[in-house]
Image: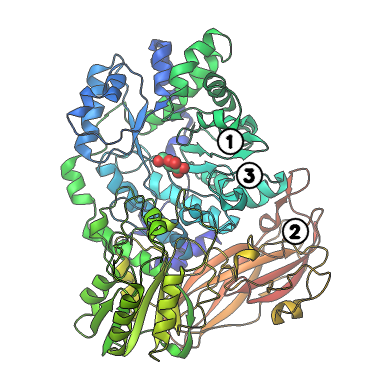
Amino acid sequence: MKKLIVLATLALSPVFSAQEMVDKPVQSYQTAQYQAKKKAFVDKLLAKMTLDEKIGQLNLPTSGDFTTGQAQSSDIGKKVEQGLVGGLFNIKGADKIKAVQKVAIEKSRLKIPLIFGMDVIHGYETTFPIPLGLAASWDMNLVQQSARVAAREAASDGINWTFSPMVDISREPRWGRVSEGSGEDPYLGSEIARNMVYGYQGKDLSLNNTILACVKHFALYGASEAGRDYNTVDMSHVRMFNEYFPPYKAAVDAGVASVMASFNEVDGVPATANKWLQTDVLRKMWNFKGFVVTDYTGINEMVDHGLGDIQHVSALALKAGIDMDMVGEGFLTTLKKSLAEGKVTQAEIDTATRRILEAKYDLGLFEDPYRYGDARWAAKEVYNMENRTVARNVAAQSMVLLKNDRQVLPLKKSGTVAVIGPLVNNSMNMGGTWSVATKHGSSVSLMQGLQENYGKEVRFISAKGANIDYDAKLEEIYAAHGKKTDRDSRSKEALLKEAVEVANKADVIVLAIGESAEMSGESSSRTEITIPQSQVELLNELKKTGKPIAMVLFTGRPLALTNVKDTPDAILNAWFAGSEAGSAIADVLFGKVNPSGKLPMTFPRSLGQVPIYYNAKNTGRPLDQKLVEKCEYQRFRSNYMDECNTPLYSFGYGLSYTKFNYSDISISNANPKGNQTIQASVTITNTGDYDGAEVVQLYIRDMVGSITRPVKELKGFQKIFLKKGESRKVTFDVTPEHLKFYNGDLKYDWEPGEFDIMIGTNSDEVKHSKINWSK
Ligand code: BGC
């Protein structure tokens, strides 16, 4: 089935050759001969190292940012010279990185090269859609390509380690970091995790254009209570293993070279000191061979968690299985003392040091410490036209059409279009959150994208219409990380008046509203998940003009759109689409690209429904399905008096300019036995007026289990492209692998019985077929 996904999507992704795609873990972990050679090399080096030098390898400071000359003179430069630094992160520029590496190689006693990390989260300078948007493409070929482009660019500029993929499952749209992950589903999340790792690490880690991936944040960070960042997490092990762990495990199975511990606690112990998590699960159950790094000051924060002083928590972290200490220098300043006092062992320090050295060996740094990064190479690789073309394609594929009444979209390539909204001329916000390396000024704004691509045929006129929020102070907080929102000092009335005047001169309105880039991301939790009132009023004012409105939504999280959804004729969710955002949005608005994105996370009707997710449990008092559909209340059933049970837009939802008709499911064998494989097929017909792509989704429900089972779980998907009028049979192979889950004893197995096989266009609209699978 996996093969089918790749083949079906190839047609949509012309830039990379099939040979470049990876479908198994990197070679370096595979041959015994390689492992033996590596071990011999590291043994020899370890034997030469002093205790201080060993602990130094476990130290990962951030640089701030260096100028080339500072490499020698700064405090960090001195530590590098003394062998007290294992790596550095978030330095940008091949020359700067080379200068620091030179200090390590020429001035430190053992000449051990440094690794250079960075938060290359959704692209390097060529920025792709925020990860939640990337997930909405459901196109694993594109997901892998985006990571490959990011790795090539980063490597050419000296980076050999990215703190990505972030795979935290989340059902909590208040949490700003949902923008950095793949949404709510363990299956989709696992596919993405795997493909991101393949994209970064390529076929061979020692090549100079492949880099170490780092799956994060291990674990469960996406379940922080009330969506408040860094907050407490508490959940059952059954839920962890079935619903939250799969993407981390998928990354490990894909050969991810490193893992980042999360800030939150798990079972009452912060992940950074959680031996069960970092050793028993990660290494013993999953056989992880790489190294584990803390998150930023993760060790020091355990003092505030209330686990003890810095010496104690540093020892706890090492003993739990942490190998590298990001920023806090807890290891650097206390491990020697802890060893002398018998609180940690030499073997524990050696093990961690070995893992860091092995990663450097895998990167080929001992052969050539300068192999990553060269200014001339970067000048050719970074933000080049080919990469930007990939980014534009990925961006267009990430967009989700939520509504399209009266076929307002695609827009006609004639007449006058009023382009209105607080960010329509804002390049800086297009990259979205966590885009460390992006040159923000160079992203294509919406207005620029429209003008440059369709300006010959269409007249575009624009107005700001409203600020992001009425509250100037709040807007300042939203832009605190530097992504300016260009607040307009005119009164609200003046802004609205101008917008209405502009709208009145046009045939159609493109209204871009929603969040600004930093309203989601780290430390960007919200208690309201609506569009700010300033922009809702703008929408309502423009509605009075009677002109058709196509709303473009900027957002880094699922928003509750109940108060706006009826007003515009069309809604296109554009997320934050990256460097080429404006061009990609223009391509979709004018129908050059027919939207095919599907939501990777449920959009609730209201915050009160949160957490709301498609793969929920039935409960003992489910609401009658007919009442669910009619949104009617029933006493003593699991529902609300004042709200429907259904979401506004369900997981997997997304429209197209064309229409797809699904046949009933045909099943090759409704009574399979044991390890058989059966086929579930549907025929899809493009019955509309446009060529288009559709994500065909397979869900399964296990009707009876030893523990309660979700009402449905995604188990497969295929993105297919159909010409207008074309039909295609889409077949999913189903095996007992698809039926497995962690039972009450955390044993991963399947249980015989009845299963509901569902295939459809989203998690809500599916065809059903029951089967009975015996052992
Ligand atoms: C974030 C990580 C990130 C790290 C380094 C932390 O605050 O949680 O996701 O990789 O900083 O920048």
Q: Is residue 692 left or right of residue 98?
A: right
- Numbered mark located on residue 233 in the image: 3
Indicate the quadrant where residue 657 lies. Answer: bottom left
Helix, strand or loop for disc 3: loop
Q: Is residue 284 left or right of residue 525?
A: right
- Numbered mark located on residue 271 in the image: 1
Please state, as top left, top right, bottom left or bottom right, where the N terminus lies in the image: bottom right
Q: Is residue 622 left or right of residue 351?
A: right
Indicate the quadrant where residue 326 lies. Answer: top left
Q: Image height check: is 415 above or below 473?
A: below
| Residue 414 location (% of width, % of height) | 26, 89
Q: Image height check: is 204 above or below 536?
A: above
- Numbered mark located on residue 112 in the image: none
Looking at the image, the residue that sits furthest to the top is 340
What residue appears at the point 77 percent right and 61 percent down from the top-left corner?
Answer: 673
| Residue 514 location (% of width, % of height) | 43, 68
Q: Looking at the image, tell me whether mark 2 or mark 3 is earlier in sequence order.
A: 3
What residue appears at the point 50 percent right and 11 percent down from the top-left corner?
Answer: 337
On the image, numbered disc 2 is attached to which residue?
709
Q: Nearer the viewer, mark 1 or mark 2?
A: 1
Q: CA distance from mark 3 to mark 1?
A: 10 Å
Q: Is residue 565 left or right of residue 535?
A: right
Q: Image height check: is 174 above or below 215?
A: below
| Residue 176 location (% of width, % of height) | 49, 54
Q: Looking at the image, tell me whether mark 1 or mark 2 is earlier in sequence order.
A: 1
Helix, strand or loop for disc 2: loop
Crowdedness near tag 1: few (<14), some (14–19) or many (≥20) residues, C-alpha within 10 Å: many
Helix, strand or loop for disc 1: helix
Q: Can the viewer see residue 357?
A: yes
Q: CA distance from mark 1 to mark 2?
A: 27 Å
